Image (spheres, rainbow, N blue to C red):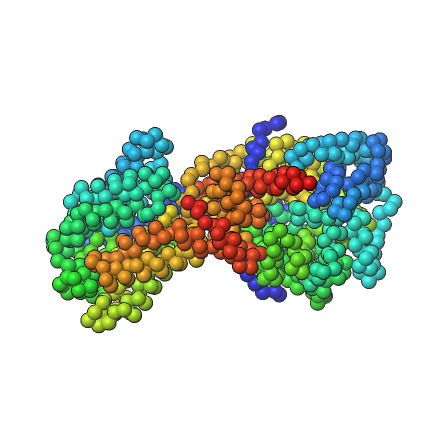
């Protein structure tokens, strides 16, 4: 087992994982309509290869990647392409082109979906990378960065360690936990495939210590493989953030505006490894994922294997509907997720959970003056000074905010969580960031 | 069913800590010291505490009403200022002393600068400093003998130690329990420690400030003193004799007037301890705690400017240090 190197900041949160931790993963079923955004991932949107009225089958290609950083999109079930039209994108907050699929209920599998390899000896690293691109795999931890891009770092950036992120530090969410518990063998198989593809000699599985069952399941699954190691992290939010993980496990720090590969590391999420492992054995592309539908506001907190594009309303219905009056519906976790105003929006490749908070839980805290208690400073995992960054941002002092490294803030929310004066620190910081970036864009534009 | 869903910026959940809750913890931590003062100095102590708190709360409310600001006495910070000021007073002062002192603390040291969070010196200590300057006789003479409640004007142990007063020194046990001459709340070391440890355990204050403060005082006394001279060179006595414990745990740890970084807070403690030491060594007053902390309050913005953590991913970034400048 790996001993931890260095950790900074972080906050203890009531993780509320008990709500759904005991619910085994179950298929959510096929909704009446699937909405598949061409922009599911970081990078360029994919380009449709089907037309309206086309009949498609489960696993069939719907849209191909466009450009270097992009990902393919496949049909999650069989049915008819009803429309290709702009729909409201819950993360981007605007209308974005989507393929709307009307399932026929037969769930017929596309002929091209055939097992790719039984074991890793019968598939080469290059073949794995091509396959990863083919199945439209993206990071399932949230950012949805195309995995194939991660696996092919520039030649001058040697990678020595691959981290498998099973920390799942966001409160409420249990999808990674259930995967590690129920599918440890497939997860490890997928992780080894990632290692092979990226030609990395050492893999470290990182799990928070509040998931002892997952730790033992994963330990069992990885025991035959000497190249794999385990790191158990004390549970503290946001230990599972990419930068925090790299610091804690390896003692390295990703440079500002840099990537993990700058310090010789690739990080992938447990769900990503699972999807790849399963895909190699069955041929099924990324068309479904595990999503926790949880929170005090749903009757039966659950972990679903849901088709990409399933409406949030359908999943909440499957979880027994609302319990009490809902106050907030969050896509993702409560610390970094996005609250949605309509339940019509579909889940994306990067959606790890839907958290419903009751109306009573969503109280508007009265904001008080900063008492300079320093709690936000102690909480920041990047050792930034949220108290000043937010003060500058609030007053519109963009230059000062930028010098205070506001652009480095990962918006983890730890500072705002801790602030006893209930100051919306992250909101201000985010505002300053977007204004600074907008200004930069305008300047670049003017220069051209 | 289309309920109105709340849309807002993440994080969507907030921690349980509130300003009021934190202030309440400080008040709870002060209860043992208040009780000790009652036992040691009788009903007079109670009257002083009540007068001081009442004056602090009333001045805050009246001032805020007068300038048409929201009345914020509900955050309990004025109550703390009132109690803390009372703790620093000799037990036999006339009651108008705490009333004036608290009013000064709240109005001049806190509200004029904009209220909680905007003041740059600790209000209670500013109040005490004002009283000390204006009515030094009351502030240095109005002692009561503990347990017998007799009025005395003899020298406190601190003055004896410093050599500016005549008298006998109490034993360590009496220091711990508080059976000695001194201000209301500074005498019973045990009661103060109980409260201080409570605050550290509850995560309300950072141990670095009292550690730096008392540690510096202890070591400094060993270094500069010797038998027959400064504090007999006895570090323990230096900590026990004056208001160092009260100051280190309850005054120097005031959030508003201490640095925001952990390292900064350690420096603040060391600095306050050092200045206290200097004043005790060469100053005219027997006690240096008040000015030690007040001076460090003034230095706090500077500490916040230069004592900056190494940001994640930056080797040693001078720009980062400059960036933290001038946030207040
Ligand atoms: S946690 Fe809130 S009150 Fe405390 S220093 Fe930070 S912003 Fe100010
Ligand atoms: S949101 Fe930004 S400033 Fe706040 S704790 Fe996280 S990284 Fe630090």
Q: Locate residue B95, reporting x and y percent.
A: 17, 43
Q: Does residue B277 show up?
A: yes
Q: Locate residue A214, reporting x and y percent.
A: 64, 56
Q: Residue lying furthest right in this view?
A: A111
Please identify the quadrant where the N terminus of chain B is shown: top right
Residue A8 located left or right of residue B306: right
Q: Residue at x 60, y 60 (%)?
A: A252
Q: Residue at x 63, y 48 (%)?
A: A174
Residue A308: quarter of image: top right
Q: Locate residue A35, reporting x and y percent.
A: 74, 35
When the figure is inspected, residue A315 is found, relative to residue B185, above or below; the finding is above
Residue A91: quarter of image: top right
Residue A267 located left or right of residue A128: left
Q: What is the total number of numbered labels drawn onto the structure image? A: 0
Please identify the quadrant where the C terminus of chain B is shown: top left
Q: Residue at x 79, y 30 (%)?
A: A83
Q: Nearer the viewer, residue A140 or B138?
A: B138
Q: Nearer the viewer, residue A301 or A119?
A: A119
Q: Residue at x 23, y 43 (%)?
A: B101
């Amino acid at each position: 087992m790996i001993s931890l190197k260095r950790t900074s900041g972080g906050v203890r949160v009531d993780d509320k994982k008990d709500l759904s931790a005991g619910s085994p993963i179950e298929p959510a079923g096929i909704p009446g309509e699937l909405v598949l955004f061409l922009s599911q991932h970081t990078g360029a949107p994919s380009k449709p290869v089907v037309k309206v009225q086309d009949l498609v089958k489960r696993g069939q290609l719907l849209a191909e990647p466009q450009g270097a950083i992009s990902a393919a999109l496949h049909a999650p079930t069989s049915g008819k392409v009803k429309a290709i039209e702009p729909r409201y994108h819950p993360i981007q907050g605007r209308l974005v082109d989507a393929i709307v699929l009307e399932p026929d209920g037969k769930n017929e599998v596309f002929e091209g979906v055939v097992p790719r390899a039984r074991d890793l000896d019968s598939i080469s690293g290059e073949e794995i990378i091509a396959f990863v691109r083919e199945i439209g795999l993206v990071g399932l931890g949230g950012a949805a960065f195309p995995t194939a891009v991660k696996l092919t770092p520039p030649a001058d950036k040697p990678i020595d360690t691959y981290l498998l992120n099973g920390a799942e530090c966001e409160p409420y969410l249990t999808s990674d936990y259930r995967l590690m518990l129920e599918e440890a063998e497939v997860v490890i198989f997928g992780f080894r495939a990632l290692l092979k593809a990226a030609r990395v000699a050492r893999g470290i599985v990182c799990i928070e210590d509040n998931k002892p069952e997952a730790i033992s399941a994963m330990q069992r699954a990885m025991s035959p493989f000497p190249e794999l190691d385990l790191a158990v992290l004390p549970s503290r939010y946001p230990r599972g953030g990419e930068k925090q993980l790299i610091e804690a496990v390896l003692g390295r720090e990703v440079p500002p505006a840099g990537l993990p590969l700058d310090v010789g590391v690739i990080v992938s999420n447990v769900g990503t490894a699972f999807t790849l492992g399963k895909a190699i054995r069955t041929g099924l592309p990324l068309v479904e994922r595990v999503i926790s539908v949880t929170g005090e506001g749903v009757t039966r907190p659950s972990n679903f294997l849901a088709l990409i594009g399933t409406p949030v309303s359908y999943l909440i219905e499957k979880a027994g509907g609302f319990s009490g009056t809902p106050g907030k519906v969050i896509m993702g976790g409560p610390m970094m997720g996005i609250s949605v105003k309509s339940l019509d929006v579909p889940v994306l490749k990067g959606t790890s959970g839907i958290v419903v908070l009751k109306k009573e839980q969503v109280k508007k805290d009265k904001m008080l003056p900063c008492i300079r208690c320093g709690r936000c400073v102690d909480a920041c995992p990047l050792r930034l000074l949220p108290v000043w960054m937010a003060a500058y941002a609030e007053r519109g002092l963009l230059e000062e905010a930028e010098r205070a490294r506001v652009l480095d803030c990962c918006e983890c929310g730890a500072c705002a969580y801790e602030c006893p004066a209930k100051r919306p620190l992250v909101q201000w910081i985010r505002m300053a960031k977007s204004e600074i970036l907008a200004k930069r864009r305008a300047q670049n534009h003017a220069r051209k | 069913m289309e309920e109105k869903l709340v849309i807002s910026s993440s994080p969507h959940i907030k921690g349980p800590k509130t300003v009021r809750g934190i202030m309440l913890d400080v008040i709870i931590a002060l209860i043992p010291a208040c009780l000790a003062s009652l036992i040691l100095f009788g009903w007079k102590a109670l009257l002083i505490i009540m007068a001081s708190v009442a004056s602090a709360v009333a001045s805050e409310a009246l001032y805020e009403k007068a300038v048409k600001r929201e009345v914020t006495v509900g955050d309990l910070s004025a109550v703390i200022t009132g109690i803390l000021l009372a703790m620093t007073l000799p037990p036999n002062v006339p009651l108008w002393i705490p009333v004036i002192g608290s009013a000064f603390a709240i109005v001049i040291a806190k509200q004029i600068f904009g209220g909680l969070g905007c003041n740059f010196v600790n209000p209670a200590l500013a109040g005490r400093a004002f009283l000390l300057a204006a009515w030094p006789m009351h502030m240095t003479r109005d002692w009561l003998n503990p347990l017998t409640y007799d009025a005395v004007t003899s020298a406190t142990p601190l003055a004896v130690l410093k050599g500016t007063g005549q008298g006998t020194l109490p034993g360590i046990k009496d220091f711990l329990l508080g059976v000695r001459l001194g201000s209301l709340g500074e005498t019973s070391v045990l009661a103060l420690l109980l409260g201080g440890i409570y605050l550290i355990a509850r995560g309300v204050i950072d141990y670095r400030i009292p550690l730096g403060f008392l540690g510096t005082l202890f070591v400094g006394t060993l270094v500069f003193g010797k038998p027959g001279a400064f504090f007999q060179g006895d570090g323990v006595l230096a900590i026990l004799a004056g208001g160092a414990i009260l100051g280190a745990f309850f005054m120097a740890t005031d959030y508003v007037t201490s640095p925001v970084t952990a390292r900064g807070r350690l420096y603040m403690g060391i600095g306050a301890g050092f200045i206290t030491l200097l004043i005790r060594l060469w100053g005219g007053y027997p006690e240096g705690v008040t000015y030690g902390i007040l001076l460090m309050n003034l230095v706090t913005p500077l500490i916040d400017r230069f004592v900056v953590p190494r940001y994640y991913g930056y080797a040693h970034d001078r720009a980062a240090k400059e960036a933290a400048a001038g946030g207040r």
